[in-house]
Image (cartoon, rainbow, N blue to C red):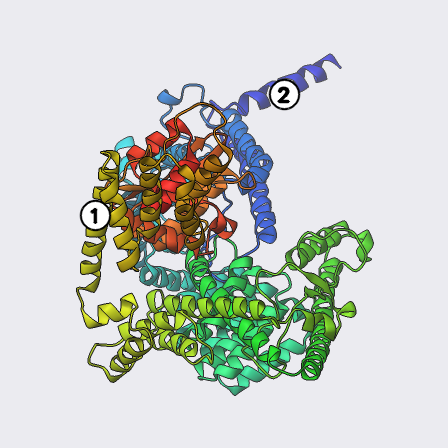
Amino acid sequence: MKRIYFLVYLGILSLVWACSTEKNTMLSRAYHGTTAHYNGYFNANDLLEEAMKTYRENQKEDYYSVLPILQLPSEEEVKNMYAPIDTAISKCTKVIQRHAMPSMEKPASKKEEHNRWIDENWITIGIANYYRRDYDLAFKNFEYTKKFFSADKSSYIAEMWMARTYIAQGKFTEANYAITNLEKAQESMENGDSKGPKGGKNSKSSKSKKKKSKKNKDKEVPPFPKKLRYDLAITRAMFAEKKKDPESEIKALTKALEYAKKSRDKARINYILGQLYENAGDRGKAAYHYGRVKKYNAGYEMSFNANLKNALNAGGEKVRKSLKKMLRDTKNAEFKDQIYYTLGKMDQQESNEEGAKTNYTRSAFYSTSNNRQKGMAYEKLGDMSFAKKDYLSAQKYYDSCAKVIPETYPNYEGIKNKASKLQSLVNALEIAHYEDSIQRIAKLSPSEQLAFAEGVINKMKKDEEERKRQDAIRLAALQEIQSKKSSDGSGNKFYWNNEKAKAEGLEEFRKQWGQRANEDDWRRSEKIVFASFVDPEDSTAISDKPESSDVTALDSLTPEMLVAKLPLSDSALTASRDRMMNAYFDAGGIYDEQLNESALAEKQYRIMLGQDFNHDMKLLAAYQIYSLHSPEDPVAVEQKDYILINYPTSDYAGYLRDPDYFLKKKEREKLTQEAYLTDLDRYERGLYYPVVAKADKVLAEEKDNPYRSKYLLLKAMAQAKMTEDKKSIIPTLDTLIALYPKTPESDKALEMKKIILNGYSTNEAVDFSNKSIYEYKEGEPMFVMIFLTEKINNVVAKTRVVDFNKEYYGKLRLSVTSKVFKEDNVILVKQFKDDIEAASYVSFYKRTRNHLLDMQKMKILFISEKNMLTLFDTNKLEEYQLFFDENY
């Protein structure tokens, strides 16, 4: 018995000794090779493949852009794959540590490897690190494999992955060098020029290695493995993809298609080739490759998109019928928007504008969960309207597009800018059309007004019913999609028990309706504007009164309520006409200055001239039409005569008579100002009689002198110095108060009259000179100050002003800063070359709502740097306001 134990013990010792990693025996190689193959290489690759498969299945492909050749995880996405990747690395690392022959205890002294699966484990570690995006560590593994196993085919695999690592790091020179080396090796193999040993792993037997000298072994070059041809072609395509070289990418993918074995790979390559040919304008080849996709295992979504692309590039009535058939298939409910969009593009290619508009509208309607597709449909509709110069419709489509598209959308900024720039035009036209429509209704008899209002309410109710019907269709489509998603998932198919479906439904609800309170009748959009007067037959009228906040429910709306909001009084009619004329004028300016549409601009100005009432804005409209044409043009001559006949004393008439009119006027104003300052100096020097005489002369003879109110005040102050009876100057003060109410001079006159009648409160000298602490200097640089209210955040305000400046005053390169005045914030815009430029900015600021919104109504002044320092030192804003009104 003891002898048997002894023999068993000897057998175990012999087996352990035979399996030593330091002994190159057949038994050792078999044992360690099998362990390295299955415990390391096989299991690790199985983990990596399963992780990548799961990633690909959960990855939402962007079929609106050219698909990436390989689906690789991003920095964030790979974090969810760390567990399988790290496990794969750990398995291979243990195999190398325990089963390398000889062992890796002294790597520097190791000259050869007898375990035929160790190189594969090194490569697997490198691939795992590549997926992990640890490119430096991955490269070290590939580089080691290439150098140490240079006589093995794994050196080619390692170099191919080195090239991919270079591409990921943006090292294009090194990547191209590695790929070119591999392509030369492949060419040699295909030409039969390789001098290396044939065969696969069996060529690396220990017996053959012992027979070869080290010198001969170093010279051996293994043949390029045929199985690597596909991966090499894909690597070349990845290089071209990263370099944004579509021609080279097409060439490489075409070559890869020859070597592809897997159906999924063939489908993806064909789809990408279709996209590349489509972008290159070769619709024939694009259609061919899209058509090939459905022959392979592409997955439903890729096959569906390939069908759409094939239809768009192939065209024809047969294809159109096929797309309409797809619309009736319930499994395509989620993709109706894409089908309608494709039909719209086909209509556009065939110059069927009406059909295209209808299909794009349906595409936007059925885009219940695909904002990218909805945005594309709105953009197409906007482009079509813009091309037709229907800017009103174009703005609404661009605005709808801008609200749904993500920031990654191509031309995102362009869409935003178009919507923003056209917004001012839309606002102006809507105000003009609205005021025009209610003025026309106000001219009707009371009975006709009530009848018209009743017709408006009936039309609004019908529109509301149609909206509800469309909402029901949209809701049914959304429910169908959600039902399909629920049935595809692993959760409970009943909607309210399916958490995923409920979460998706809530997200979709918020996209469509926004944040809503949990209350009854939340969907009642019939909370309409109170004075919603529109002509049912008038397509130019609008249904909402701008800037009105008086709203009521449709069910409780009566004709009398609408009629009560009409401009029936003289004051209401005058205000409505003012709003309308200003809106038409603003629209004309936008057409001319921003859109370069002089014909449309002139149309707005002619509408102003065609009104059957007198208005000062007609002068501006006539001059704008004149300026749109050359002086010799009959249209310009007509407008010139109109201005000279109807507005002979206006500045515009003066300019038309004399091109130097404004220069001369400015010179006259300068002389007038100097004359007033001379008389003011006389007053300060005690020359009161000449001051009174000059004031009487100006008041009697110079009716257009801008300093008449100042001369009246100066006369009163001089008279006060000349007499002990201060009450004698009260008639002069009363004249000033009556002729120029609500002016700084009138306020000063009231103060003087109060003192004269009521006496002094203290025994102090009274200064009637009204000398300001601020100084006026012509032509000095100016700053603009915007005084903020508590309702707006300082940062938000600065952002709005910066956006306003970028759009309208980009050439001036204005800077925007903030300061604190007293306890309020002030936005400071600097700097303007003189008061004329600053005044122009302030004027445009006050009449432009775009970007500024409610800031448009805030207090805004311009001021010189010296006066600004005085203002901040003294905090006397009211006094500067008087100085500002007097001088600017």
Q: How many marks?
A: 2
Pick the front one: 494 or 100: 494
Identify the amino acid type marked 1.
Ala
Mark toward the viewer: 1 or 2: 1
Whole-percent x, y for residue 200 in the image: 43, 47
Q: Which quarter shows the N terminus?
A: top right
Identify the amino acid type marked 2.
Ile
| Residue that lies at the very extreme toward the top in this rendered image | 2
Question: Is residue 335 shown above or below 128?
Answer: below
Whole-percent x, y for residue 545 in the image: 60, 66
Q: Which residue is mark 2?
A: 12
Left or right: 193, with 609 as reference point: left
Q: Which residue is mark 1?
A: 675
| Residue that lies at the very extreme toward the bottom in this rendered image | 317
Q: Residues within 10 Å of mark 2 (few under 14, many from 20)?
A: few
Q: Residue at x 44, y 24 (%)?
A: 102
Whole-percent x, y for residue 726 in the image: 40, 37
Q: Which mark is residue 612?
A: none
Pick the front one: 679 or 553: 679
Dot 1 lies on which element? Answer: helix
Whole-percent x, y for residue 12 in the image: 63, 20
Dot 2 lies on which element? Answer: helix
